Image (cartoon, grey):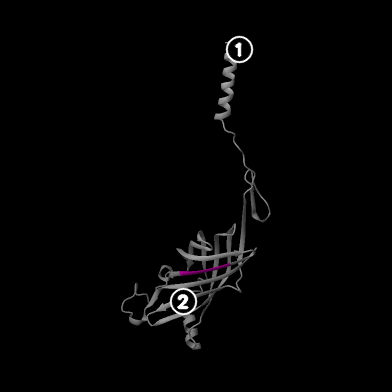
């Protein structure tokens, strides 16, 4: 082999190894304070925060209809939190204390107390056995601005079903506000009292299956 030929082959070998074997980069993820994750190559930051619901400044109301009218009232959230990533809603979990349920439309005290007692009884929520309901947010897709399509699980009387609803969630520094309207089919949770889908000849005694939960929450960063 001539010196010239050897030089050509050596140059070709160097060229092939240079252009056909890309370098492999190892990226190390490190988690610092406040849940910030840094990558060595891009230095991209992911800020994860938890916001705890302020029970005193938050409000959860309910509304239900029957053939001859409607009722509405309030119920308290006993514990709740939102999971936020880079100011975007990612998840959450909320416990509802069903023993705090009240009625707001009946002015007669006896009728008011009777309705609340019925709601707490085995006929409806059976709060002695199931004192709490629970809502878990599994996913939230931002549609525009502070608007989200939320999907999750709602548990009432030990029965869990999928729920989906639009919500507005805004983060401003260490404060979070959220509002939503959740429509619930009570019969999916074994609350069938006076439902026309399970009882016949109810006439004007019918209570409609759906009721609404109107959510207005305030939460603080932890």
Determine the CA span between mark 2 and mark 1: 93 Å
The residue mark sitting in front, 2 or 1, is 1
Residue drawn 55% across the image and 65% down it: 169
For the residue pair 205 and 26, the one nearer the viewer reads as 26
Residue 96 lies, in percent from the top left, at 54, 70
Quadrant containing the C terminus in the rendered view: bottom right
For the residue pair 178 and 67, the one nearer the viewer reads as 178
Q: Is residue 196 left or right of residue 172?
A: left
Magenta residues span: 177-182
Q: What element carries label 2?
A: strand
Q: Can residue 161 be seen in this view?
A: no
Marking on residue 63 = 2
Q: Mark 1 points at which residue?
A: 3
Q: Is residue 188 visible?
A: yes
Residue 131 lies, in percent from the top left, at 53, 72
Residue projecting furthest to the top:
1
Residue drawn 44% across the image and 73% down it: 211
């Amino acid at each position: 082999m001539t010196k010239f030929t050897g030089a050509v082959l050596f140059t070709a070998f160097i060229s092939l190894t240079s252009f056909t074997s890309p370098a492999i980069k190892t990226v190390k993820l490190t988690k610092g304070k406040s849940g910030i994750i840094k990558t060595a190559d891009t230095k991209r930051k992911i800020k994860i925060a938890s916001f705890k619901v302020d029970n005193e400044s938050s409000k959860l109301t309910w509304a239900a209809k029957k053939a001859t009218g409607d009722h509405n009232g309030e119920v308290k959230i006993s514990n709740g939190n939102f999971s936020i990533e880079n100011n975007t809603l990612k998840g959450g979990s909320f416990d509802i204390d069903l023993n705090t349920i009240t009625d707001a439309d009946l002015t007669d005290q006896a009728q008011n107390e009777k309705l609340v007692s019925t709601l707490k009884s085995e006929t409806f929520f059976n709060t002695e056995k199931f004192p709490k309901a629970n809502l878990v947010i599994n996913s939230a897709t931002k549609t525009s601005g502070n608007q989200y399509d939320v999907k999750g699980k709602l548990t009432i009387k030990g029965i869990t079903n999928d729920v989906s609803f639009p919500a507005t969630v805004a983060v401003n520094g260490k404060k979070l506000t959220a509002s939503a309207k959740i429509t619930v089919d009570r019969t999916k949770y074994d609350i069938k009292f006076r439902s026309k889908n399970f009882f016949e000849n109810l006439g004007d005694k019918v209570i409609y299956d759906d009721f609404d939960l109107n959510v207005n929450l305030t939460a603080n960063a932890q």
